[in-house]
Amino acid sequence: MSAAARPNWIVRWLVHLVTYAVALTMIAPFGWMISTSLKTNRRAIDPNPSLLPDGPLTQWQWHHYLEAWRRAQLGDFYLNSIIVAVVVTALSVLFCAIAGFAFAKLRFAGRRITFAILLATLLLPYQVYFIFAYFICSWLGYIDQLHALIVPFLASAFGIFYMRQSIVTVPDSLLDAGRIDGFTDFELFVNIIVPAVRPALAALAIFTFMASWNNFFWPLIVIDSSEHITLPLAVERLSAGQFVDSWPQRMAAATIITVPTIFVFVLFQRSFVEGLALTGVKG
Amino acid sequence: MNGRSSRSGWAFVAFPLAVVFLFTALPTVAGVGLSLFMWNGSDAPSFIGLGNFQAAMTKDPQFWYALRNTLIFAAVTVPITTVLAFLFAVILNARWFVGRTVVRTMFFLPAVVSIIAVGYVWRWVLDPKAGLLNATLEWAHLDALFGGDLPAWLGDNPWGLGAMIAVQIWRNLGFCVVLYLAALSQVPRSLHEAASVDGAGPWQSIWCVTWPAVRPMTAFLIITGSIWALQVFDLVWGIWGEAEMRWTDVLNAHLYREFTHLRISYSATIGVYMLLLTAIVTFAQLRWMRRSEEAYR
């Protein structure tokens, strides 16, 4: 919103109040997760939980973080998660953007029908198709390989649809100008579309990274050995068998693996702000 | 759409489509095929035609409860989430908002935190006896609103469905805010400047300039939001549990429960019903979206 359309101070004050109140309810579970991770095992499962761990800061159970890190061998599995999430995010954003560009701005035979089929694949829940997706991965020899966590996610119907919706709003006149300059379609994509939809690319990168990083169900099915598991599986192991009282450790581990997603979010969301300056000119 | 037919079109979509086809479309077709058989996962499947489909309609009351709840769930959560997300995105995009980077991150956190933690904290909040919500209602003397009896939010009653709707809005709001923020930053600033030169106030500027300008994103959020609401699973499974309940069961939870009971082909049948339902909803929305895109040009 431009500075010209600034509401008066009463409205601004109320808006801040409401928005901050909502924001507080948004972070409550995260705060609870951290608080639990610092409680003693017994206090963590108390039916009348306290907001903060007992005692002063120095008496909080910080050692749960170290224990969680060691017990779940997070150090060993961080690399697996990072490889998978980074490769999937980089390639999937690229492939979805270029396909979204084709669906939004290029003409080719069968465009409408392929797009409709693509949308149709969004309609079924994975509970129905994961069995056969597993068979295909096994046929390709991907079982128990990081391939199984990467290749099926290199493009998604959601990502292509999202990029198409973002690219549709880029004015055709910009593309025409590029064509007059003799740009090929790929050059149009790199030089005109990518700068114009940078905020959307950043948003898709955030979601793709998050989905890959937090994916639990699929790795559980396709990864058998302990060598290639990703972080969520490593954390889930904390609750298995011998560590009965491990609730605070699990929360500590959950906090440790959540931090990179927040980092990625903060890093990428900056481009929403920068986007303003870039697209402000084109009008 | 302008210009002549392009040869790059297919080159650009070929690989992404191949990935989606191989790992989603093909397994989906196989899953649909499975619904025509009787299969428990180990014995040889036997063909029974539409027998599973008939069984769902006639012999499975839980299917109807789940269907009703799913429809209510989607019809309430999607419009509320979309409109709220738009308003908060406009607020968090405004220059005069203090601390917008921090607040944006706070809004996004529910989507980041694992469902294990989310489930545990909401079970504590919604617990009818020791829960935070009922304690607050009692403290504020709001129990009269419920006829003196505070609702059992986790129980098998319409309040359970209401709580489910609230948690879904809470969890998805930040996600939609982020998509709107990205769309908003693509709106040319000159549009707003022109509007304020014409004497439009902030409110008019939002509804007459911003809202129409992000229409493709609204269409996207309504379509994908409806699909996800119709497929809701982890939140229901994580908070309301695996039991068959009349008011808090949804289609996908019913499907997965049947799957874990090794009625695998019957669970595929529920999936096909979900496909049909989602397809009808999406098709109607796509028609509306096409019209709105034509208006946009």
Image: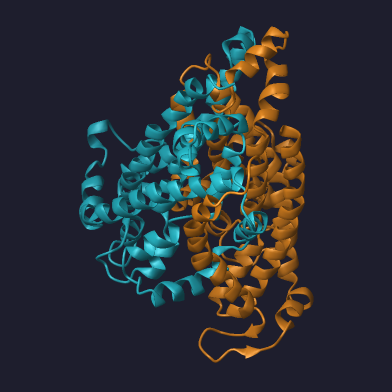
The residue at 63%/38% (across/down) is B217
Identify which residue is drawn at 57% across, 20% down.
A17
B256 above or below A22?
Answer: below
Picture quadrant of residue A175? top right
User: Among all residues in the image, which is located at the extreme right?
Assistant: B58
Decide which of A273, B156 is in the foreground and name it.
A273
**Residue A148 place in picture, x, y as percent:** 37, 65
Question: What is the quadrant of the N terminus of chain A in the image?
Answer: top right
Chain B on-screen colour: orange
Using the image as rendered, state which of residue A47 and residue A39 is in the foreground.
A39
A267 versus A44 height, above or below? above
Q: Is residue B115 left or right of residue B292?
A: left
Closest to the observer, A191 or A3: A191
Residue A62 visible from this viewpoint: yes
Q: Colour of chain A?
A: cyan
Q: Residue at x 33, y 65 (%)?
A: A240
Q: How is the image coloured?
A: by chain
For residue B52, above or below residue B153? below
Q: Position of residue B239 (x, y in %)?
A: 55, 54
Residue B222 in picture, x, y percent from top left:
67, 44
- Image height check: is B223 above or below B96? below
Does residue B258 show up?
no
**Spot occupied by residue B72 in the image (x, y as percentages of width and height):** 74, 52
